[in-house]
Image (cartoon, rainbow, N blue to C red):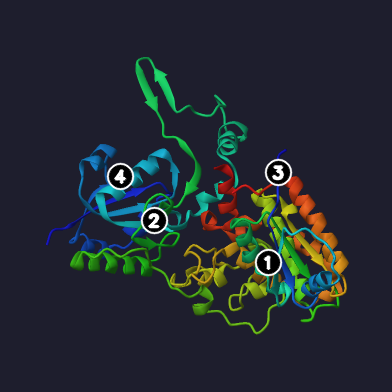
């Protein structure tokens, strides 16, 4: 039997919402695939598109960005909107370059949504498994 | 002291050659120290002549590596010379020709020779060798990728600019002079500022920037004193090295990034996305909401062409793509 492809996924989670949501998922003992490597950043707008592309180049098969819900949840007032604009442009750039845009995902996850994080993680891993590894 | 023996090879638009010739009298004083044994643009030389010179001091290459002939030439020059110089943005970073790396080789050849409306006659991609009676005619192979020189061989001095400005070329002349005196070849010296162009920009520094949308340069009348980004036009100044004397800015044209990326930035396009993400509608984000922002970002034209105008071979997207074809 052939081994199932186990993707590597880097998750940039903002400290105030998505990462707190991941903590909640942890203490609530929710299960989600171990393929996700969570990285806590202070705000989703701190995620430079360079980080995302660097992750892809260094071996990630998918990148998840987690931030606070729009319009009013961001701890820094409009950080999530800045992240959203960058995400849209990055997606467009990946498309122009011929790299699957499905490998990049942005989700708004609040500190109370541990369940949503587990769900998003499971679905995202499934999607990347279908796509297969990002060949470099 | 013996004169330095120099070879100048090019595979570009020859704009760099013109920039060198434009040095005028300075070139004459340089000719006391340097003797050109190969310079196809200036006089008639053949590849055989170049092969006969086993010991060269200086090799100047302008233009990117697109065909197998360019690669052969660059490897030969590196082997026989002590100081390898990449002249111009194409040689240093790939330049505009390297934007072709967005498409694969066959797509490019088919577009040029078969699909383009202006191509007439045979409508087929030229073969690498053709037999004419008993004579076999060959052409160089069109390579899969368009490369800057340092993807193929090591480079001692980078002279960026499209074409290199007078100040940069003066610096280059001083570097040659220094080499003439000491015979110490620098390793990977870039003749440009470490700081970004904005650091020396003559325009007024804006306090806060918020733009409605990203305009293309023909869509808007530009103010000669205001920052380009403030006026909603993409300027690559924030991520580009200074040292070019801001000639484009002074002529009311945005920076296109021909001096290369500053060392603090790894990928100019990604960093520019970050820049534009910060300033696009930054006062009205909440009113517009996600849908409103989507509409505005949709209209940002030609991301890769305008963000990586001169430096696509060093971008993450190309590194990821190139890995794919291995």
- Is B187 placed above or below B63 here? below
Q: Position of residue B193 (x, y in %)?
A: 43, 73
Residue B186 shows up from this direction: yes
Chain letter, disc 3 residue: A
The mark found on residue A3 in the picture is: 3
Rounded to the nearest angstrom, the CA distance separating label 4 from label 2 is 21 Å
Q: Nearer the viewer, residue B214 or B280?
A: B280
Image quadrant assignment for residue B128: top left
Judged from this view, the residue extending furthest toward the bottom is B207
Q: Which residue is mark 1?
A: B220
Chain letter, disc 1 residue: B
Q: Which residue is mark 4?
A: B76
* Label 2 vs 1, first from the N-terminus: 2
Rounded to the nearest angstrom, the CA distance separating label 4 from label 1 is 49 Å
* Label 4 vs 2, first from the N-terminus: 2
Residue at image coords 60%, 37%: B107
Rounded to the nearest angstrom, the CA distance separating label 2 from label 1 is 31 Å
Left or right of A102, for residue B33: left
Residue B213 shows up from this direction: no
The mark found on residue B16 in the picture is: 2
CB contact under 8 Å: marks 4 and 1: no
What SS does tag 3 mark?
loop
Q: Quadrant of the N terminus of chain B?
A: bottom left
Q: Nearer the viewer, residue B46 or B222?
A: B46
**Mark in the foreground, 4 or 2:** 4
């Amino acid at each position: 039997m052939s081994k199932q492809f186990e993707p590597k996924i880097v998750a940039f989670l903002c400290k105030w919402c998505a990462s707190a949501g991941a903590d909640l998922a942890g203490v609530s003992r929710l299960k989600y695939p171990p393929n996700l490597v969570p990285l806590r950043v202070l705000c989703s707008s701190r995620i430079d598109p360079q980080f995302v592309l660097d992750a892809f180049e260094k071996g990630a098969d998918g990148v998840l960005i987690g931030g606070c819900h729009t319009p009013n949840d961001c701890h820094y007032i409009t950080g999530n909107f800045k992240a959203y604009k960058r995400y849209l442009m990055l997606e467009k750039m990946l498309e122009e370059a011929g790299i699957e845009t499905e490998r990049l995902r942005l989700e708004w996850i609040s500190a109370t949504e541990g369940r949503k994080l587990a769900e998003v993680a499971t679905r995202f891993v499934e999607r990347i498994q279908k796509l297969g590894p990002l060949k470099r | 002291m013996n004169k330095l023996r120099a070879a100048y090879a090019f595979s570009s638009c020859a704009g760099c050659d013109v920039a060198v010739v434009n040095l005028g009298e300075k070139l004459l004083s340089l000719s006391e120290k340097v003797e050109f044994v190969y310079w196809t643009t200036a006089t008639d030389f053949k590849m055989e002549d170049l092969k006969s010179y086993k010991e060269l001091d200086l090799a100047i290459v302008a233009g990117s590596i697109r065909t197998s002939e360019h690669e052969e030439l660059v490897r030969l020059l590196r082997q026989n010379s002590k100081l390898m110089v990449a002249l111009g943005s194409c040689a240093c970073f790939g330049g505009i020709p390297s934007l072709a790396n967005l498409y694969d080789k066959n797509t490019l050849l088919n577009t040029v020779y078969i699909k383009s409306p202006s191509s007439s006659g045979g409508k087929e991609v030229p073969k690498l060798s053709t037999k004419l009676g008993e004579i076999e005619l060959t052409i160089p192979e069109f390579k899969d990728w368009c490369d800057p020189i340092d993807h193929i061989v090591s480079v001692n001095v980078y002279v960026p600019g499209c074409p290199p400005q007078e100040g940069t070329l003066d610096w280059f002349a001083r570097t040659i002079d220094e080499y003439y005196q000491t015979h110490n070849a620098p390793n990977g010296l870039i003749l440009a500022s470490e700081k970004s162009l904005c650091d020396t920009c003559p325009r007024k520094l804006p306090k806060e920037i918020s733009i409605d949308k990203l305009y293309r340069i023909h869509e808007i009348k530009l103010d000669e004193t205001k920052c380009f980004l403030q006026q909603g036009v993409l300027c690559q100044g924030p991520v580009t090295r200074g040292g070019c004397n801001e000639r484009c800015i002074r002529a009311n044209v945005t920076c296109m990034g021909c001096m290369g990326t500053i060392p603090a930035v790894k990928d100019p396009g990604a960093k520019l996305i970050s820049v534009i993400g910060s300033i696009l509608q930054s006062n009205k984000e909440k009113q517009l909401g996600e849908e409103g922002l989507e509409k505005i970002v949709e209209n940002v034209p030609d991301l890769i062409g305008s963000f990586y105008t001169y430096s696509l071979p060093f971008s993450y997207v190309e590194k990821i793509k190139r890995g794919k074809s291995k």
